[in-house]
Amino acid sequence: MAQVLEFKLPDLGEGLTEAEIVRWLVEVGDVVAIDQPVVEVETAKAMVEVPCPYGGVVTARFGEEGSELPVGAPLLTVAVGATDASSAAPGDDGDAAEEPSGGSGSGSGNVLVGYGTGAPAARRRRIRPERNTASAAPAAPAAPAVVSAPSRPAPVAVGEVNGRQGPVAVVSPLVRRLARQHEIDLRGLTGSGPDGLILRADVDSAIRQAGQATEAATRTAAEPAVAEASTAVASPSAAGAAVTATAERIPLRGVRGAVADKLSRSRSEIPDATCWVDADATELMAARAAMNAASGPSGGPKVSVLALLARICTAALARYPELNSTVDTAAREIVRLPGVHLGFAAQTERGLVVPVVRDAHIRNAESIGAEIARLTELARTGKLSPAQLTGGTFTLNNYGVFGVDGSTPIINHPEAAMLGVGRIMPKPWVHQGELAVRQVVQLSLTFDHRVCDGGTAGGFLRYVADCVEQPAVLLRTL
């Protein structure tokens, strides 16, 4: 007789208390193996596939796609021991439909608190409803243990795809999210990728087609709509009601909610101050060009400006360790940290994230640049783990990529400082006693006034500016 076990949303680590269900990977009636991913969730830090620690038949799922569940809430129930009974039922000749679990044969790859993974990617079997119920009668004793699933629409990830039964061929969670946002049914798309894989270009094309259809329908109804709008505007009270009715409410959750909470906490707890300076970055840009030219066409990845600025920051923090610290408010102590874990701000489709380059103080510019490139790609695809987004001790924020010169950064709590970098652009500058056009950048340092005074912060920022203007200054610390 099958035993029904309840699988709850596990602790995803790093203090996370809730997660949003993005996509169910299994349906009620599917057979799952131990450590098979069963649901894709989005936390405030990363997109995660959650593996199930039980093997058996899924008897119920809890939570709609798009809903949030707290840690410890039930995710699904599994009838353990029901797999063999159903597969060995008289009259079952083993032709139950098998579907790939969506993995590539390397396991779920997600290690969560409480249990780990590592088993090969599992295959699940769907029990066909059209089987002869009379021949399956011996399996009936397991029925009392099955929990009824709550009523909900079937997930778009599974269904009849272009005439065949199976999972929708979508790998990227960003593509799935884009489709959901524009109400595009992935089951009706034909993928242009390998083996029919649905790519973002396919979804973009479907969005354009839907937009064209909507536009045509709008043109058809244009005259009645204009007349109706004119009538509404004629009455001030009606116009005010119309404005109120169209107000949009956007939930502060997921990445956006986490950012809001952290920024609010930073502003409320940290007495911050900002100082800034303009620096002539002409020599830094020339040094970067020389580095990349010396590497040759096949000499490895190019060194980015951000990597050079990151290396300058680690050198400055070695001179001014007060800024690589945090404040223990309970103990009323300043904790100076032994190593530099450098965070850098990255804008993604999911919002602002801050990946962390571990042990940046022992890396050179090339190593830092390679790690920044790797983490940026993971951020772009939504694959950063919570561990890669936490533990930073100092943050570098290059807002110059947005075409702005300056800003007053908000400290990434519980760190003590953040360096902001504006765009590097040609400006008139006095160089060697004469007016010249130079590559100028504005540097802004926001710091926790509890960990140091303005003299220390000014010394740090001046050293950074000196390294930008004269990169040879760095030779002392290389």
Image (cartoon, rainbow, N blue to C red):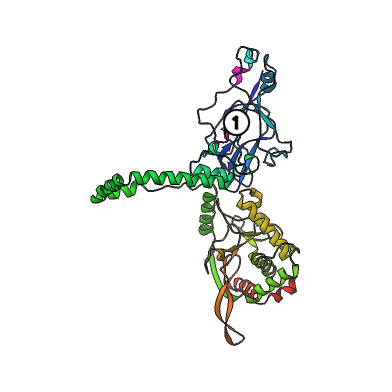
Residue 327 in sight: yes
Closer to the camera in the image, 175 or 418? 175
Q: 113 above or below 236?
A: above
The one nearer the camera, 419 or 130, is 130
Q: Residue 37 is drawn in which quadrant?
A: top right
**Vertical relation: 39 (above or below) 433:** above
Over which residues does the magenta segment extend?
142-159
Q: In the figure, is residue 115 to the left or right of 329?
A: right
Residue 26 visible to an observer of this rendering: no
Asked whether residue 212 is drawn in magenta, I would say: no
Residue annotated with mark 1: 164
Q: Closer to the camera, 168 or 151?
A: 168
- In what quadrant of the picture does the N terminus appear? top right
**Quadrant holding the C terminus:** bottom right
**Horizontal relation, residue 364 to residue 389: left or right:** right
Magenta segment's dominant SS is loop
